[in-house]
Image (cartoon, helix red, strand yellow):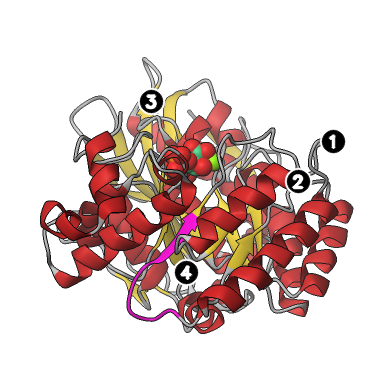
Amino acid sequence: MSYLVKIGDEEEEFEWYLDFVKKDYKPKDDELIAIFRITPADGISIEDAVGRVASESSVGTWTTLYTLPPRIRNLMAKGYEIISLNDGSYLAKVAYPLDLFEEGNIPQLMSSIAGNIFGMKAIKGLRLEDIYLPEHYVKHFKGPIKGIKGVRDSLKIYDRPILATVPKPKVGMDITEYSEAAYEILSGGIDLLKDDENLSSQNFIKFRDRLNSVMKVIDKVEKETGEKKGYLINVTAETNEMAKRIKLVADSGNQFIMIDFVIIGWAAVQTVRNLAEEYSLAIHAHRAFHAAFTRNSSHGLSMFVLAKLARLIGVDHIHVGTPGVGKLEAKTVDVINLCNLLRENVYKPKDNDIFHLEQPWYGLKPVFPTSSGGLHPGTLPIVLETLGKDLIIQVGGGVMGHPDGPRAGGKAVRQAIDAAIKGIKLEKYAEDHKELQRALEKWGFIKPI
Ligand code: CAP
Ligand code: MG
């Protein structure tokens, strides 16, 4: 339906929505580009659906307007390159003039390209698959504080993945129990102790007490083993409280903090990142809650987008899933893509990958992918082989469930990694490494569910 719209002193015919679609559009170098997977509602053409997405995520609304000054018309997003996926859904790119976005403000970016559009009746399914960030947009962010090299320098570990363990049960332990578990885990050879995502400062284990107690354990283990250790302490809380906890961590001498970055939200991630920089702390980004909207392949947004924005803002580690093994849903190709996105200076999609765009990082530091979830010593060669050694591997139950206790669990994990790096089959290496042998007896090579 076309309408007359005043543009300046003129009146022009406007084919609303379709005026936001230019199928053969060539985006300008400084435009931000989103790739959406779109499933139109019954009776809605894909062109109309793309136009509605481009309109609602830029300057439009449901109807033509009485007037649209030329300057604002120049802010219209443009939908283009529409590809059918032959299942009722399509991939479409939308190019956005950068003036639509406030420099350095991720919440505002997401309000635009990941806001109202998910609820439009004319669209049955909408998934934000990727965002190309032009240099002019990227340069307003500082990226990771330490990055992979900085974290390795903190721990003096260069030739293998970095190992972390969450003391299990997830929550409930008191200070004494938690500290004892920490001592056993770290003495067994694990590098980083990690709080679970739902541990914060419950009555049975207050934050400050836990921090002080674990730091005493770390001091003791470092002296006994000669190895550097760290504590991924979860500071997730209300923002002012997080600021206080970050200061406590800095004062304790620990070099790490952990946040549930999807739960606390983009604004808080940006605040935490700037606070952490003041104290030169590395940020471990746990992704709890992501699966509420990343898991559905036709609606929501991809983990790829979450990881890209997390690197842009500046976390140092981020969970990416497990390759084929593990307990949580993840496609190996997606996990590998995430690792490449986080570690490469320029992310280049594989030839047949139409869901992602090339992304130069313009010097932002690389981020440690973290593989975790249902891992045990028998799964580690696969993880290392598939994801490479610039990786953090978290093994929680696979250490705390070792038949001879957490210290043996930590040793079994280190032995499995040593075997994998030396190219020795685990069962061979286990012949003279009893902790590994006992882990294989319990869990074997069976992939956890
Ligand atoms: C793993 C974990 C992590 C998950 C998060 C858990 O414990 O601590 O939170 O890995 O998933 O609570 O399940 P286990 P993801 O080592 O005992 O499985 O890494 O995919 O974000
Ligand atoms: Mg957990």
Q: Cα distance, mark 4 to mark 1?
A: 34 Å
Q: Is disc 3's CB within 8 Å of ligand 1?
A: no
Look at 48% across and 57% down and name the residue there. Answer: 164
| Element type at mark 3 | strand
The residue at which mark 1 appears reads as 203
User: Distance from label 3 to label 2 (Cα)?
Assistant: 54 Å
Main SS, magenta residues = loop
Q: Which residue is mark 3?
A: 40
For label 4, the crowd category at 10 Å Cα-Cα, with few meaning under 14, some 14 to 19 and many 20 or more, is many
- Residue 92 against residue 250 in the figure, above or below: above
Instruction: Look at label 2 and name its amino acid.
Output: Ile
Cβ(mark 1) to ligand 2 < 8 Å?
no
Is ligand 1 less than 8 Å from the beta carbon at label 4? Answer: no
Q: What's the amino acid at mark 4?
A: Val
Crowding at dot 2, Cα within 10 Å, few <14 / some 14-19 / many 20+, comes out as some
Are the two marked residues, 4 and 1, in contact with CB atoms closer than 8 angstroms?
Answer: no
Between the C-alphas of marks 2 and 1, the distance is: 11 Å
- Of 433 and 366, which appears nearest the observer? 433
Magenta segment = 157-164
Report the residue that reaches farthest toward the top: 42
Q: Position of residue 47 (x, y in %)?
A: 36, 36
